[in-house]
Image (cartoon, grey):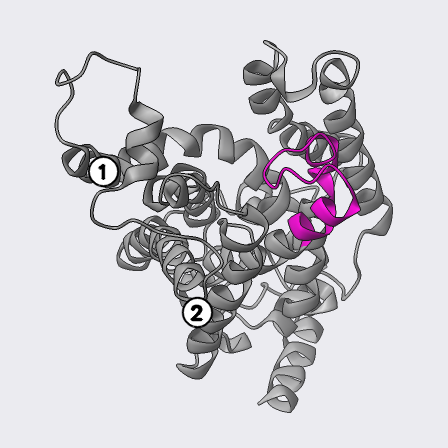
Amino acid sequence: MTVEPAPQLPRHGVVSAAAASARRGASVPWPAVIAFVLVACGLAWLVALPLWFGEGLASPLAPLILPLMMLAPAAATLVVLFVFRVPSQGRSRFLGLWPLRPAGRFVLFLALALLLPIVIVVATALLAGALGLVRLDLVGFSGFAAQLAGSAPAGALPPVPVLVAVQFAALPLGAVVNSVLAFGEEIGWRGWLQTALLPLGTWPALLITGAVWGLWHAPVILLGYNFARPDIVGVLLMVGGCVAWGVLFGWLRLRGASLWPAVLAHGSLNAVAGIVIVLAAAGVAPDLGWAGPLGVVSWAVLALVVGVIVLIRQFRPGTLAAPRTPVTPAAVAAATAAEGEFR
């Protein structure tokens, strides 16, 4: 029997979302997706239970439980990979773990992943200050000084502006350190779930993944984490923030043809998350539901950033990357036709 060789994909594996959909049979593996969501969310609740039956976020176990919870999506990924066998082959490419090429694009998107969250969070704080939603002190940094008061004898610390500069200078290192645990989430969210949902189209995959990511935080949000709103409003704020950031992280994953930019961006966001506290004036704690890195103002800043990406034509299906796996001639023809219709 003669077997026709599989057609070659475009160089570097850059294909349209339509091509990715056709290549996977235009079908979402729903049983595996449902299992992934149930395992990831179920484990999050299970890990957080000691906080619910104890002292909440004030529990001495919280510093251990919160990082441990970040491994739940990774555990869910192992379940769908080895129990549901989705995908059955080419797993490192499906998840975006490998290959790390082309090298120039990979390095470029790592740089964007490091810098964009820092710029966006700082811009969010400044915009919130301009709108009167938070009172900033960009000269004396009185809020940060108040936090430091009592932590050391008077005169033992460098001037507060110097310490603030050190905080900013340490952000790249903080991003890398935070990426270690962020990987536990990103291999699930942007690695497996988003890729599995791509047959629905790029935007549905990004938005659904972001919404699931936000809801997954519910066990700690309902304890007052992030927004100090232990209610449905806090959960909705988290969903909104994760959808907004999820679009950017998802774009980094697809346009960068690798999971690692999304991992670093997540680590960078976690590293810079407290910067609004550093910039705030003393006396009134900022409302993180508005001015925080996941608050409403950040949604507007992220919408502007994504809008620019769309305007410079970096969000077109033909610019996005997808896992490279063998395709059939029929799939190539279907993908080409679909891509032509999109354009």
The residue at which mark 2 appears reads as 305
Q: Nearer the viewer, mark 2 or mark 1?
A: 1
User: For the magenta stretch, what is the residue range?
Assistant: 215-239
* Image quadrant in which you'd find residue 309: bottom left
Tally the marks: 2
Residues at marks 2 and 1, CA–CA distance in whole angstroms: 26 Å
Residue under the image location 46 percent in, 73 percent down: 304
- Report if residue 19 lies within the magenta region: no
Marks 1 and 2: in contact by CB < 8 Å?
A: no
Say whether residue 224 is magenta: yes
Q: Pick the residue in front: 81 or 69.
A: 69
Query: Picture coordinates of residue 186 (x, y %)?
Result: 55, 41
Q: Earlier in the sequence, mark 2 or mark 1?
A: 1
Q: Nearer the viewer, residue 262 or 169?
A: 169
* Tag shown at residue 164: 1
Q: In the rendered view, would you say 103 is above or below 231? A: below
| Label 1 environment density (alpha carbons within 10 Å; few <14, some 14–19, many ≥20) | some
**In the rendered view of the protein, which quadrant contains the N terminus?**
bottom right
Residue 14 can be seen in this image: no
299 and 145: which one is in front? 145
Residue 325 is situated, as x and y percent measured from the top left of the image, at: 59, 55
Horizontal arrangement in the rendering, residue 132 relative to residue 165 (left or right) = right
Q: Is residue 24 left or right of residue 255?
A: right
- Label 2, secondary structure: give it: helix
- Looking at this view, name the residue that lies furthest to the right: 31
Would you place residue 243 above or below residue 262 in this image?
A: below
